[in-house]
Image (cartoon, helix red, strand yellow):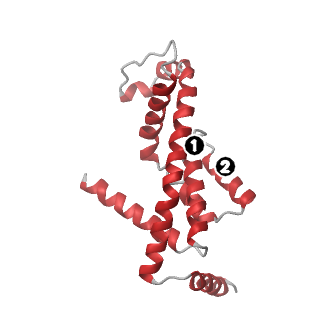
Amino acid sequence: PERIRSLLVKFLGNLIVSLSRVPETPERIAFAFSVGVFIGFSPLLGLHTVLGVFCILLFRLNKVAKMLGVWSNVPWIVVPYYGLATWLGVKILGMPKGIRFPRVGFYDLLGPEFWAWLVDQWRLLIPAFLGSLILCTALAGLAYPVALLMVRSYRKRFEVSRESLSHKATRDTKETRP
């Protein structure tokens, strides 16, 4: 528990610092981050990065803030999150007919019987999609004010202005050119 807590604090700290150093207004950073969170937790599992890049190109959102939002759905969150999303969808729509939940051990995941069973449970996709859509919308709605508060607080605390970030980015670019 203590190790997990320290990793979570370190992850969130790095996220806040990374967002705060983006040379944009806090509002644009928070917006790009919240759109990234929406995509990162959307029901379109496996397409998150592609959708994130597409939105960056289409809407000209900040790349760093957007992709930090997309990638905030880290691997150790995926299974509990989509399990919760499916549960929420089942609570709203009801349990589809023909669904059964077997007792599955870790080594059962390696056998073909488990994967055949999983494919047979396709009726859970609609509740999972709906639950994930509701949760990703709620998370994106929370991400905007939280990111905005964190970026503003960090910049105020360390007196980081947009101009100094732009100047630093320009200076770093000049230093790396031959």
Residue occupying the far top of the picture = 98
Asked whether, in this view, residue 94 is left or right of residue 64, the answer is: left
User: Residue 8: where, in percent of width, then height?
Assistant: 36, 57
**Which callout, 1 or 2, points at the residue further toward the start of the chain?**
1
User: Residue 15: where, in percent of width, then height?
Assistant: 46, 64
State the mark number for residue 42.
1
The mark closer to the camera, 1 or 2, is 1
Determine the residue positioned at 52% across, 52% down.
141
User: Residue 115: where, in percent of width, then height?
Assistant: 51, 23
State the mark number for residue 120.
none
Amino acid marked by disc 1: Ser
Q: Which residue is mark 2?
A: 51
Q: Residues within 10 Å of mark 2 (few under 14, many from 20)?
A: some
Q: Relative to 79, does residue 158 appear above or below in the rendering?
A: below
Determine the residue positioned at 61% across, 84% down.
172
Amino acid marked by disc 2: Leu
User: Residue 130: where, in percent of width, then height?
Assistant: 56, 33
Quadrant (top left, top right, bottom left, bottom right) of the C terminus: bottom right
Residue 70 in sight from this viewpoint: no
